[in-house]
Image (cartoon, rainbow, N blue to C red):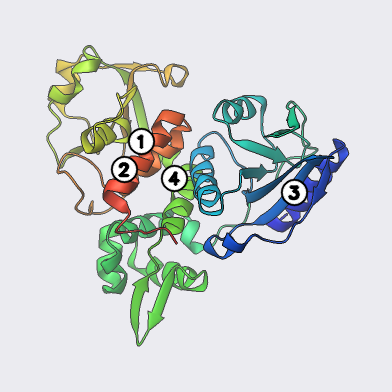
Amino acid sequence: MNEAALIDRTATALLALGLDVHRPKPPKKAAQVQADAWLRVGKGQGQVDYVVEARRTLGPATLGAATMRLQQMADATGLPGLLVTDHFTPPMAARLREQGQQFADAAGNAYLQGPDLLVYVTGRKLPGKPVAAHAGKAHTLTGLKVMFVLLCDPELANAPHRAIAAAAGVALGAIPAVLADMQQTGHLLVLAQRRRLNATRRLLDEWALAYARRLRARTLQATYMAQDFDAWKRWPLDPPQALWGGEPAANLLVDYLVPGVHTIYADKLPPKLLVGQKLTLVDGARAGERVLEWRKPFWGKMPAGARPDTVHPVLVYADLLATGDARCMETAQLVYDEYLARLLPAA
């Protein structure tokens, strides 16, 4: 089931709820965005026009990136955004409603709100298990690593294959297939034998979503409780062997978010930190409760970022979105505005 079929099934599910569903003429500002669809949903006088973002098999880790993309389209068109997927679980539905994000799925779950319109349905199950969308070479684990270093340093797109492979930490033989796939999807432009990354925020958000879905969970090595959680700025990190990521990195970059989870990217944690903070292992059930996440670097050479003690803002942005937390998403926007907007402008 591709995105068009997913939207059709969701429209059918909304009709089954007794709602009217139409496909209106795209608004004048439609050319500014690459929406998956435009839908008019409601009943009688309570009809609302939506710009639609459809994403297959969304989960808690991928909600942030999909929602951020939809918010951009809503801002550009002046229309409310409707997030569509195969199935939203009750916890996902509750989180989206709390954030004010309207949604609908192929199972008939929905949250719609407008003048003379309020629909909230959760708990409906989708018959069968959703089939994961096929990933091209650029969305394999190797492809995501290559895309990461290109997003951090778009000039690297025209470098020799060996340099790209070294930066991404992947096999040299994998580079041609990844670049060919990126060219086919329009993310890499080739003119007069020169390669140029089509560096846009859309590509950033696509990478952030795919990273959360396929790669991020593999980076987590262990979760710890620390003795003095709030004194993290004084912890002996010893960069570049260990770098702040996620919420603490965002705090250092934009001074907006008080970290609830500390993230460190390192091949191994500094011994002074292990001893000084008396780090004790905790299981995954304690995640999110003032803990330290140790994550393994997935790149070959971290591209130069904004600070020597943090990972690149591209990764900070993606890690914040992967939390799905509204405050983290606000901070991700600040990181984008200050550090990434010129590098990866809105398309």
Q: Amino acid at mark 4?
A: Leu
In the rendered image, is residue 196 in sight? Answer: yes
Instruction: Determine whether the residue tagged by mark 4 lies in a helix, strand or loop.
Output: helix
Camera-nearest label, 2 or 4: 2
Looking at the rendering, which quadrant does residue 311 occupy? top left
The single residue placed furthest to the top in the displayed view is: 227
Q: Amino acid at mark 2?
A: Val
**Residue of label 4:** 215
Bin the neighbour count of mark 4 within 10 Å (Cα to Cα): few under 14, some 14-19, many 20 and up.
Answer: some
In the rendered image, is residue 265 in sight? Answer: no
Q: CA distance from mark 2 to mark 4?
A: 21 Å
**Residue of label 1:** 331
Name which of mark 3 and mark 1 comes first in the sequence: 3
Q: Is residue 1 left or right of residue 316?
A: right
**Residue of label 3:** 40
Q: Amino acid at mark 3?
A: Arg
Decide: is 193 above or below 158.
below
Q: CA distance from mark 1 to mark 4?
A: 22 Å
Name which of mark 1 and mark 4 comes first in the sequence: 4
Query: Would you say the residues marked 1 and 2 are in contact, meaning their CB atoms lie under 8 Å apart?
Result: yes
